[in-house]
Amino acid sequence: MLKFVFWALVAVNAALFAFREGYLGPAGLEEHEPARVKNQLAGERLVLLTESEAKAAATSADTSDSVAEEEAREPEAPAAAAQPEPAPATPPAQAPQLIACVQAGTFSSADARRFESRINRLDLAARPSRVDTPFQEITSRLVYLPPNGGREGAQRRAAELKERGVSNFFIMQGDSPLRHAISLGVFKSDGAAQKLASDLGRQGVRGVRILPRGPQTTRTAFQFRAIGAGVRTRIAGIADDFSGATVRQCD
C-alpha cells in the first residue's frame, strides 16, 4: 500500500513538472510569459514595461479616455444666427424750398374782401398781411407826341403833322411835364387809343405814345411770406379770377 501511494505521488509530480515546463503543449492563459511572447505576431516590436512605466501608461490612457468622453458630451455650438442685412440708409428728407415773399393785387375794397375770404379757405400756416399801394384809376388814354425842343420843337412837329394830313391835334400848355407835348386824341378804351396810334404810324408819324390817365388812389394788396411753390400756384389761381390782379415777388 505505501508503495502505491509513493509511486502515485511521483507520477503526479512528474506530470506537473512536464505541464509547467511546456512539455505537454500550450496551456492558453496559464502559459508562462516567455512562451506567450514567442507566440505573439511581430513579437520583436513588443516592449516589456516596468511596474512604474505600466502605471504611468495606464494613467495617461485614463486621462485620454476622460477627455474624449467630455468632448463627446459637449453639445455642438449652435450655428451663428444669420445677421440680417442692414436696411439701406434713407437719405434725409430735404426741406421744401420756400419763397420769401409773394404779393397778390391790387384789389378794390370789394374785391379785397372776396379775395381774402377765398384765401382763408386754404388754411395757410400764416395769414397774409394787407398792404396799401398807390393806384391810378384809369379813366382815359391820351395819344400824344412827347415834348421835344420846347415851344419851337412843338411848332416844328405840328407843321410836319399838317404835311402828313393830320389836322386833329393841339400843343399842350400848362406847368405839367407834358408842356409843349402834342395831343393827338383822348379815348376811354385802350382799343380805340391803339387804333389811332396804328393809323398815325401808317401815315408816317413816328414817336406816338399812349398815356393812361385818371385820379391817383390806393388799393389793397396781400403779401404772403415763406410759402412753397404749390401754395403760390393756388394763390395765383384765385387771383386770376379778379380783373387786373397779378401775383409777383414783393418789392
Image: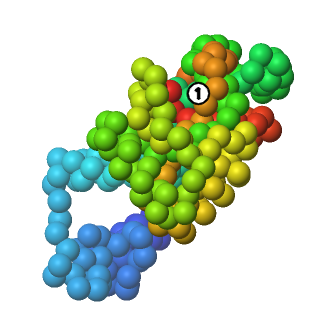
Would residue 141 be found to the left or right of residue 80 on screen?
A: right
Question: From what the image shows, is residue 214 above or below residue 16?
Answer: above
At which x and y percent is residue 10? 36, 71
Under mark 1, the amino acid is: Gln
Residue beneath label 1, please?
Answer: 103
- Asked if residue 86 shows in the view, the reply is no
At which x and y percent is residue 111? 80, 23
Question: From what the image shows, is residue 110 above or below residue 64?
Answer: above
Instruction: From the viewer's side, name the closer residue of 98 and 251.
Output: 251
Question: From what the image shows, is residue 141 above or below residue 107?
Answer: below
At x 49% / y 52%, what residue is drawn?
Answer: 208
At which x and y percent is residue 91? 48, 44
**How many numbered discs sit on the rendered protein?**
1
At x 73% / y 44%, what residue is drawn?
Answer: 189
Would residue 65 be found to the left or right of residue 49 on screen?
A: right
Question: From what the image shows, is residue 15 above or below residue 67?
Answer: below
At x 68% / y 46%, what residue is drawn?
Answer: 190
Instruction: From the viewer's side, name the closer residue of 55 and 16.
Output: 55
At which x and y percent is residue 196? 63, 56
At x 31% / y 41%, what residue is drawn?
Answer: 152
